[in-house]
Amino acid sequence: MQVIRIAAFSHNNQGGNPAGVVIGDEMPTGAEMLRTAKQIGYSETAYLAPKNDGWRIRYFAPEIEVPFCGHATIASGAVLGERYGENTYTLYLNQGEISVTAARSATGVFSASLQSPETWSAAAPHGYVAQLIDHFNFSITDLNPEYPASFAFAGAKHLIVALSDHRTLSTMSYAFEPVEELMRREDLTTINLIWVESGRTIYSRNPFPPGGVYEDPATGAAAAALAGYLRDIRWPGERRFEIFQGQDMGIPSRLMVRFTDQKGGRVQVSGETRIILETDD
């Protein structure tokens, strides 16, 4: 099968999270999709096939299928835009549906905006968070009490953990296997570690061990879940903000997020894309 390689949420035509995109007349089997995703080695590969007035889409990490992936959706939007023109495309998930809008910039680069699944958040048990943090190179005392650790959902479940300073975030490390085991216990996709610089700028790092990935450089699903969480805690910041992720990995990424005050409402996540050449892989 032909795999198109696109980096989503790139910044100034650099960085971004690589995703594979496969578009075919029919959806491959689950075993075929998982095998190809493992061969590609990106955090996710998206598979699309025509359905009704839109596209059926599934997402596979090297180790598991995930219910929703933001950066692979943005990458898919860019591929659909290149093939079929600037438009809004309906995408059918395993559960529910979303949309992605593709637009070409004046320089010819495609950007895309997704409308996430509906959101929810709930406080995470203190004991669970403490047990998880024990496997990181920081402690509970490094967390920002203004942002209580919480589970957050926008098509996939994440844990939001806010740190008090940027340095702690930038030096993040953790023990892979114990964290993976604890995350699987709560069916978490990533841990979204954040530092809030201001009401319009947030820095983030996303461990993703359940998918066989130490860290994700740009995570659109986690960004949408974060926005839903910020809405639920009545964040005084802007309803339109940006997330910088991947800098500490040498893969600078920028995600633009927009949400409304509607409880549980969908979140818009946007970003630029760049084609990955064979020499970049």
Image: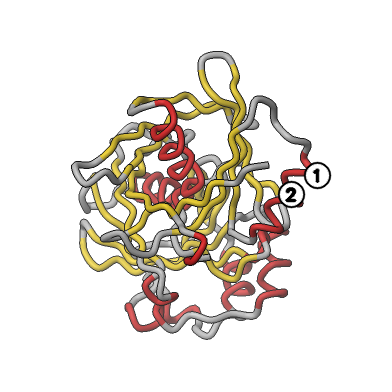
Identity of the amino acid at label 1?
Answer: Ala
What residue would you read off at disc 2? 34
Q: Which colour scheme is used?
A: secondary structure
Q: Are marks 1 and 2 in contact (CB under 8 Å)?
A: yes
**Label 1 neighbour load within 10 Å: few <14, some 14-19, many 20+:** few
Instruction: Name the kind of residue labelled 2 in the image.
Output: Leu
Q: Position of residue 46 (x, y in %)?
A: 59, 43
Residue 138 is tagged as none
Q: Name which residue lies at 47% across and 66% down.
A: 280
Single out the residue that lies furthest toward the right: 31
Question: From what the image shows, is residue 172 above or below residue 40?
Answer: below
Q: Where is residue 274 in the image (x, y as percent from the top left)?
A: 38, 53
Give the secondary structure at mark 1.
Answer: helix
* Residue 31 marker: 1
Q: Quadrant of residue 180?
A: bottom right
Q: Is residue 265 visible?
A: no
